[in-house]
């Protein structure tokens, strides 16, 4: 089939998560036509650990060329993880794209803590390693001053890929507002850190996430077979892509006071991020790794998160065995608990070392069961800390776990816990940006609470052990 014979006005979503890179081809009705993925490799060579942007670029162009034979591609939308930026000049990167899990020297952290804007203005907690993007930029400026001086634009990661595809430099609030220390979500403006460090001149003009920056560069159209009119959309931070379908185009949260408590959104993947659109900011606590993200509509959104995908793998193993309801019940009956944390990259229990207490686990299925119980308990804890009292929608990779949403639903009586049919949690949001104003096609299915014996009491015991 040639491009002219396939579906017209399809969208390609470039989805760069911390663990995997995906390209998804979606038709005009929102149905997936094709998907390809690769590991998101961090290179250890060079001046510091960095993302293999060259490998992603070549793989992306080759995959786009294959997709262009399936459908006529009308738009490409980049969606990426947060806490990542690219420093570019007219020719490309001036320094490799730093991996946010790299820990700069402790001396630099102490200095940076005196430079960053206060939490009350940014709602960006002080985080380990490079999870505060401002710390990455300050370290790069201090250690590589000559290279940093050549920088023309500081591009958030989605907009770096949009720039490579379109040649247009853009800024966008969802990545700027993702615990970077660079943005004030409540005021919708840059923080004092940006001015203090002299970075304001490097910040490109702000665009909406759904804005078209321009057509694909002619050389790329020729190489890939994309039509010359293929639009490059500005792009968005990944958990905000998941959130997008739960907002409306007027800028109001999906839940409002008249309709009852706001619906919370649980975006799951390497990170599990609980968001409460329309929620109050005054309950956020820096020491609990609570923050205000910024939605695509510019609104501050209270959030709390933990590295759930990473912690699940630490407990269940890299290739977890399937577990059944009987395995879950066994662990509850015997009183085996997993206590946080099993990743050292932030979260409400950052600084604690994870442990398993109680009778030992006899096999792989029990390890998966324990990981499932643990992630359900952590998610319930995060939702409670956030003040979520209404329904919950689960997005992302945990929708593939048949027990996760039912376990969570059993802990939140009076609320409906639903899962979406978009297991990536970002594909629908990316499609929406290319079709701004059209309703999303993905639907949510209510989960039936899993009536395990002693499950609420197990949660209460787990909370006691945490204290």
Image: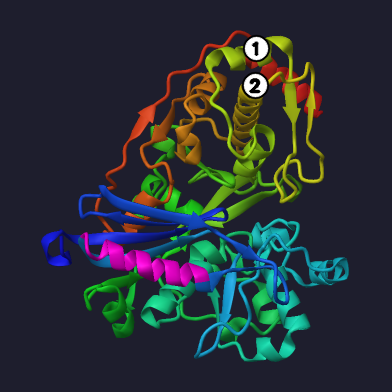
Percent x, y for residue 247? 39, 49
Chief secondary structure of the magenta portion: helix
Label 2: which residue?
366
Q: Residue at x 71, y 51 (%)?
A: 345
Quadrant including the N terminus: bottom left
Q: Residue at x 49, y 22 (%)?
A: 406
79 vs 91, nearest the viewer? 91
Q: Residue 113 occupies which quadrant of the picture? A: bottom right
49 vs 154, nearest the viewer? 49
Percent x, y for residue 272? 58, 43
- Residue 262 visible here: no
Within the magenta stretch, is there residue 63? yes
Looking at the image, residue 50 lies above or below residue 420: below
Label 1: which residue?
330
Q: Residues within 10 Å of mark 1 (few under 14, many from 20)?
A: some
Q: Residue at x 31, y 37 (%)?
A: 443
Percent x, y for residue 275? 53, 44
Numbered label attached to residue 123: none
- Residue 10 visible here: yes
Tell me the element at label 2.
Answer: helix
Tell me the element at label 1.
Answer: helix
Q: Residue 370 occupies which quadrant of the picture? A: top right
- Cα gap from disc 2 to disc 1, whole angstroms: 8 Å
Q: Residues within 10 Å of mark 2 (few under 14, many from 20)?
A: many
Q: Residue 143 occupies which quadrant of the picture? A: bottom right
Tell me the magenta residue range: 55-70
The earlier-in-sequence mark between 2 and 1 is 1
Judged left or right of residue 436, residue 369 is right
Q: How many marks?
A: 2
């Amino acid at each position: 089939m040639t491009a002219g014979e396939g579906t017209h006005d399809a969208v390609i979503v470039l989805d760069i998560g911390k663990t995997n890179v995906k390209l998804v081809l979606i038709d005009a009705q929102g149905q997936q036509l094709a998907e390809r993925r690769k590991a998101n490799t961090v290179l250890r060579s060079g001046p510091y650990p960095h993302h293999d942007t060259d490998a992603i670029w070549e793989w992306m162009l080759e995959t786009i060329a294959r997709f262009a034979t399936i459908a006529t591609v009308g738009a490409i939308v980049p969606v990426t993880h947060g806490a990542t930026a690219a420093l570019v000049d007219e020719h490309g990167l001036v320094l490799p794209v730093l991996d946010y899990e790299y820990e700069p020297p402790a001396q630099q952290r102490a200095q940076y803590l005196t430079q960053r804007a206060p939490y009350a203005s940014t709602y960006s907690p002080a985080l380990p390693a490079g999870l505060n993007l401002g710390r990455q930029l300050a370290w790069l400026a201090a250690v590589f001053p000559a290279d940093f001086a050549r920088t023309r634009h500081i591009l958030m990661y989605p907009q770096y890929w949009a720039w490579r595809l379109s040649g247009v430099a853009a800024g966008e609030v969802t990545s700027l507002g993702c615990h970077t220390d660079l943005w004030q979500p409540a005021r919708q403006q840059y923080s004092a850190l940006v001015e203090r460090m002299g970075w304001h001149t490097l910040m490109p003009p702000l665009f909406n996430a759904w804005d078209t920056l321009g057509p694909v560069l002619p050389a790329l159209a020729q190489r890939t077979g994309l039509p010359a009119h293929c639009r490059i959309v500005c792009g968005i931070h990944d958990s905000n892509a998941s959130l997008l379908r739960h907002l409306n185009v007027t800028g109001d949260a999906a839940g409002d006071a008249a309709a009852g408590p706001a619906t919370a959104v649980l975006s799951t993947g390497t990170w599990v991020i609980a968001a409460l659109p329309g929620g109050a900011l005054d309950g956020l606590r820096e020491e609990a790794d609570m923050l205000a993200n910024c939605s695509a509509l510019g609104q501050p959104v209270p959030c709390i998160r933990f590295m759930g995908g990473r912690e699940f793998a630490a407990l269940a193993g890299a290739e977890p065995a399937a577990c059944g309801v009987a395995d879950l019940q066994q662990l509850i009956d015997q009183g085996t608990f997993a206590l946080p944390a099993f990743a050292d990259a932030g979260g409400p229990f950052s600084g604690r070392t994870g442990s398993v207490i109680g009778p030992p686990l006899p096999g792989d299925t029990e390890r998966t069961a324990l990981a499932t119980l643990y992630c359900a308990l952590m998610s319930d804890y995060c939702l409670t800390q956030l003040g979520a009292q209404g329904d919950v929608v689960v997005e992302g990779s945990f929708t593939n776990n048949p027990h996760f949403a039912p376990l969570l639903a059993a802990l939140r009586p009076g609320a409906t816990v639903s899962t979406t049919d978009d297991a990536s949690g970002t594909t629908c949001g990316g499609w929406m940006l290319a079709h701004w104003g059209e309703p999303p096609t993905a639907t949510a299915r209510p989960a039936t609470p899993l009536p395990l014996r002693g499950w609420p009491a197990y949660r209460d015991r787990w909370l006691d052990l945490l204290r």
